[in-house]
Image (spheres, rainbow, N blue to C red):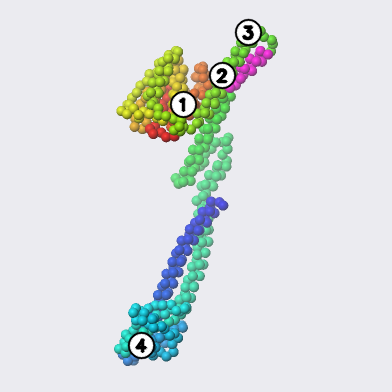
Amino acid sequence: MKIRHRLSLQFTLISGIILTIVFVLIYLLSAQYVQNSFYKLLQMRALVTAQVYLEKDELTKKKFLEIEKSYRERIPDESSNIYDAHNQPVFIEKTKYNWPVSMLETIRHREVYRFRFGDESGLGIYYPDNQGDFVVIVTARNTMGVQQLQFLMWILIIMFFIALLITFVMGQWYATRALEPIKSINRQVKNIRSNNLHMRVQQGRNKDEIDELATNFNSLLQHMEQAFDMQRSFVSNASHELRTPLTTLIGEIEVTLHKERNKEEYIQTLGTLLGESEKLKIITDGLLQLTRVDAVLTDANTELIRLDELLWEIQEFWRHKTPAGRLHVKLSNMPEDAAQLCIRGNRPLLMLALQNIVRNAFKFSYNRDVSCHLMYNKSGTTLSISDHGIGIAGTDLEKIFMPLYRADNAHTFDGYGIGLSMTQKILQLHKAAITVSSVLGQGTTFNIFFPHNGKF
């Protein structure tokens, strides 16, 4: 079922429930009003009956004639009874009902008493007079009131179904108009394929949920376009990195097989093949490590790590390297409680990520000094790693974290473009953010931000 039909039916259902409650209340209140009006009429008839039979000697002739005339205007199926203090019927000889003494006593006690008798309504009044104390009972069938209620009921039923029909039609019209932006988005989405991810969904001007949906979808398209570009770049870079050693392997084998060689030439060829095979192994091992870095960090495979101690370990490591690399560590704005420098993470992975950055800093600066600046603040801890190397061009800054991507000025250095990709994934696992700034020919700075209370 389409959304507009479902919305229309739900809107109709809600309206039907509301109308049912309202119409039932209208009917019940009308029935109560009709019943009260009829009892008031019965009470007036009971007073007129008492005046006709009991007040004849106390009223003027003109007044009595008026009351007598009113008495003759009887209600359909009306029946009257008058009882004296001894519970005996008086004045009216032809009575329809013979009421029990208990009811007569109830009427005397309450003075006005309403009751139902079969399909008729009845009312009794206590009427004290100079001739004695009497009870007057009048019963009648509210034929007109029943007809009015039946007419009202049919009117409400017809109005109910007409209102539901109008509500459903209007709901269809409103739902169609309300969902038109979504239909427009669907039409535009159908035209988007992998070869035209640059297209975007047209956003509305209402700043509503549909506009928010279009915005989020465009954002998704942008991420997908970037992912596809990264994938194409990865395939291109991977094929380039893998093609070079494979071409060398094939070329060496073909040249060697072209004619018979002496032992020294075979040994030389095998050495070349071994070197190129080791390059292939390094690349494939690096790609395999990239997939393994996607593991989930939990409390079981993490521990508390002090960032300053980690830097001292890295500094000590490079002090004993040959040639020795001078790593300068600087601490700023350190907290009084050293525990605030701790983060929860996987120590070997975090060490690998930082070592990759430091190793690149030494490599691309021709082993010049590298500085590490650790700074603490309320929001988190920032680690800056700077070198004075060849720098990175602005067009390459957004691509250096892509697997197997190498900037144009980095091809003269050993490497395969895997380290920074691995570093970014490791830092993302630790809920840390990494940014890079660089000036071509002057140096590069990597800034890593570790937020406080980062949870996995």
Q: Residue at x 45, y 69 (%)?
A: 27
Q: Which tag, 2 or 4, sits closer to the chain's start?
A: 4
Q: Which tag, 1 or 4, sits closer to the chain's start?
A: 4
Q: Nearer the viewer, residue 79 or 163?
A: 79
Task: State the CA–CA distance, disc 1 to disc 4.
Answer: 110 Å
Q: Residue at x 39, y 34 (%)?
A: 453
Which quadrant holds residue 126? bottom left
Asked whether residue 189 is in view, the answer is: yes
Does 368 sit left or right of 222 as displayed?
A: left
Residue 264: mark in rendering: 3
Count every numbered label the image shows and give the total. Answer: 4
Amino acid at circle 1: Leu
Q: Nearer the viewer, residue 208 or 334?
A: 334
Q: Which tag, 4 or 3, sits closer to the chain's start?
A: 4
Q: Is residue 302 above or below residue 31?
A: above
The x, y position of residue 291, in whole percent, is 53, 29
Residue 349: mark in rendering: 1
Q: Which tag, 3 or 2, sits closer to the chain's start?
A: 3
Q: Magenta residues, as a range?
A: 241-257
Where is mark 4, residue-wise? 86
Amino acid at circle 3: Glu
Asked whether residue 51 is in view, the answer is: no
Query: Residue lying farthest right?
Result: 259
Task: State the CA–CA distance, disc 2 to disc 4.
Answer: 127 Å
